[in-house]
Amino acid sequence: MPDDIDAIIERIVEAARIPSRGRRDELRRELRSHFEETGRMPEGLDAAVARFGNIADIGDSFRRVYRRDYIAFYVAKVVGCAAAAAMAAILIEGVASLRLATNVDAWYLSPRFAHAAAFGVILALAVVVAAEATRAPFAWSRALFSLGGFVIVSAGASLLNASSAGAIATASILATIGIGVVRNAMTWPSRAALTLAAFAAAEYLRHQSLGITLGPLRALAAGSILLMLWALTMVIVAFADRAFGGAFKTT
Amino acid sequence: MEYDREFLTGTVGVLLLSLLNEREMYGYELLREAERRSSNAFLLKEGTLYPALHQMERSGLLKARWRNSEAGRARKYYSLTAKGRRQAQSKRQQWLQISAAMRSILGDGDA
């Protein structure tokens, strides 16, 4: 099989965006079998290629055929990513809430762990949503799907616990700040410093509005925990993106 | 002859179901059979055929299997499922009724 035919087949298979490797191999095999067949005809392979049609259009047609599989795979990626980020948030907040009871020499969880973990989970979900919604190249369908999912989860959480509405609003603001800083700051150290400052300020203001005294150092510590949570969530998002993109690679 | 695409929309499915209702065929065989029987009036593009076959397979109208030809060449053969046979029958009926109605409007001499 000539290289240009193999390249045409690969372009079609890649454009089809079929999540299953088995199905991609099957399509590749079928197209190769077709060109082997047509190449033996008197008109030859060039005529067969010309007759095949516009490669981009064919790729689009196959993409439409396998669109449902692609969407299911994408939803699974976002849900998996959100679940991993939520678990990471609980872990971080758990470690941050560990206290040592010196009188019995044992570790215990701070009474505020449940509240902190719930807020951490909401923030992690908000970061996943913000990353999906603003992913380049921007797509309205993806942004609306992400935001719609977050609104549904938030509405469910608010129904279960009316006081969570404030936490959801704060987490949404923090996620927007975090993503906004990452998109606009130049270097990683400046991104981290700006995000930390923004998170610490937000924590300080949030506690002030609730009438809770939070000194600058404690605000910085609270901001550091959120920064860690945000950074780990972004790592999870990047890892999921790489795995998702890799699933469609044909070579 | 170049046909108006509007006329051809929907014909690919009827054509494939009708041909596969007779026997199992592979992609290139379907193309050649459509050309031969229509005296080259239907020159299907492969780029139209293969996505249509995959769509019909996913819809449960067709099933496919790999089989070696007598020359030892592996080919993917398509055949109708029970659902596909029912669909073929229904489409055929509809098509015959529509074409009969059109003939009676246009007149046999002009059709």
Image (cartoon, coloured by chain):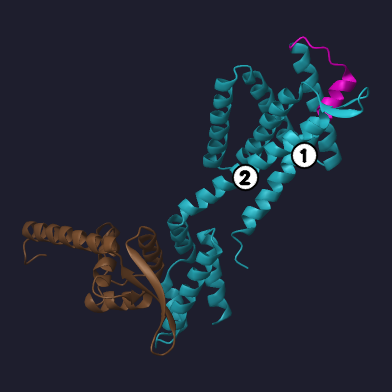
Chain colours: A cyan, B brown
Name the chief secondary structure element in magenta: helix
| Residue A15 drawn at (x, y percent) | 53, 61
Q: Quadrant of residue A62?
A: bottom left
N-terminal label among 1 and 2: 2
- Left or right side of A103 for B92: left
Tell me the residue at 59%/60% (across/down).
Answer: A248
The residue lying toward the viewer, choosing from B10 and B103, is B10
Determine the secondary structure under disc 1.
Answer: helix
Q: In the rendered structure, find residue A231 and report the number of the disc placed on it.
A: 1
Res A29 visible: yes
| Residue B30 drawn at (x, y percent) | 32, 75
- Left or right side of A212 for A85: left
Instruction: Check if residue B47 falls in the magenta segment.
Output: no
Tell me the residue at 63%/55% (across/down).
Answer: A245
Instruction: Check if residue A217 falls in the magenta segment.
Output: yes
| Residue A120 drawn at (x, y percent) | 72, 30
Query: Magenta segment, which residues?
Result: A210-224
Determine the secondary structure under disc 2.
Answer: helix
To which chain does the residue with label 1 belong? A
Residues packed near mark 2 inside 10 Å, few (<14), some (14 to 19) or many (20 plus): some
Residues packed near mark 1 inside 10 Å, few (<14), some (14 to 19) or many (20 plus): some
Q: Disc 1 vs disc 2: Cβ atoms closer than 8 Å? A: no
Mark 1 or mark 2, whichever is nearer to me? 2
Q: Callout 1, which amino acid?
A: Ala
Tell me the residue at 43%/57% (across/down).
Answer: A65
Q: Which residue is mark 2?
A: A80
| Residue A143 drawn at (x, y percent) | 57, 38
